[in-house]
Amino acid sequence: MNLIICTRWIGNHIVENAVLAAVAFMFMLSMGTALAGPPFVTDDPVPVDFQHWEVYIASQWEHDRNEGTSSTLPHIEVNYGIIPDMQLHAIVPMAYSAPHEGSTQYGLGDLEFGVKYRFIHEDDKGWTPQVGTFPIVALPTGDSSRGLGEGRIKIFFPIWIQKSWGTWTTYGGGGYWYHPGKGNKNYWFAGWLIQRDLSEFVTLGGEIFNTSPQAKGESDETGFNAGGIINLSEVHHILFSSGRDFKGPNTFSAYIAFQWTFGPKGKNTN
């Protein structure tokens, strides 16, 4: 029994160190499509636990009837609980673009950084929800002339709210995107989600969201996603979702990720 426990500990330790090394390597490469709350577009106010990590290797795919197909193949997302109620966030994407007109392109996309901070905790005995904010900055590191980035900095200023009852959780909110550039417009995003834990292994949910016009001459967009999380173990998880616009050019979108969650024992603060 002791040998089995020791073997499992060594295996988990090797995996965690390998993940950290891979993430560091990707960051070094990146230094020489903004996402939200995986696997959904709508986010929540819950930060990563203090001194804990979330690491995703993921891909997001979208087909636009007007523009063509774009995706991340893959992107690396890292979240770290730097202090209680606050996490640091970063995404390094490898972007893919296949427009209706023009050649297929592949390369580094726009880097994303953010800080999530929860300033109100949920009251389990009452109606007080969790509330937080999650400002995000997308840097124009992708080559916009090749369709791999925006070409300008983008900044998001949101407020997120969450409440849980037993196996049910609902969250949502929205915010304002600063979206400069010729022909672009600053715009609002709003979304709401409901999900249920079917067991300790499976959570399923669905969301609906809306964005105001992002460029001159465009209309607002309304869409939905359905998806979930499969917990393979305490540290290994699969996340997935898919959906499309009710109103707008997106005819199909999908997200899939493999996630590691790890950190020191006995320091869960959520």
Image (cartoon, rainbow, N blue to C red):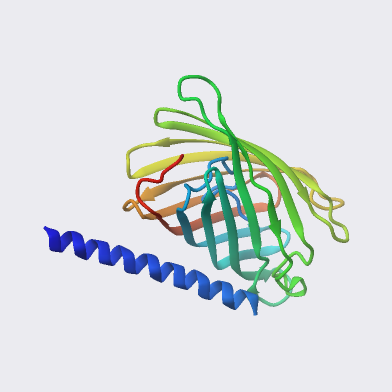
Question: Which residue sits furthest bottom?
Answer: 32
Where is 153 relative to 45, above or below? below
Residue 118 visible within the image: yes
Quarter of the view holding residue 33 = bottom right
Q: Position of residue 21 (x, y in %)?
A: 45, 72
Q: Position of residue 160 (x, y in %)?
A: 62, 38
- At a point 40% along the width and 71% down the height, the residue shown is 18
Horizontal side of 212 relative to 63 (left or right) equals: right
Where is 31 relative to 241, above or below? below
- At a point 40% along the width and 46% down the height, the residue shown is 267
Q: Split into 4 quadrants, where in the image is the N terminus?
A: bottom left
Residue 42 visible within the image: no
Quarter of the view holding residue 62 = bottom right
Where is 59 relative to 223, above or below? below
Horizontal side of 146 relative to 48 (left or right) equals: right
- At a point 56% along the width and 41% down the height, the residue shown is 44
Q: Position of residue 47 (x, y in %)?
A: 53, 45
**Viewer-proximal residue among 229 and 84:** 84
- At a point 80% along the width and 54% down the height, the residue shown is 179
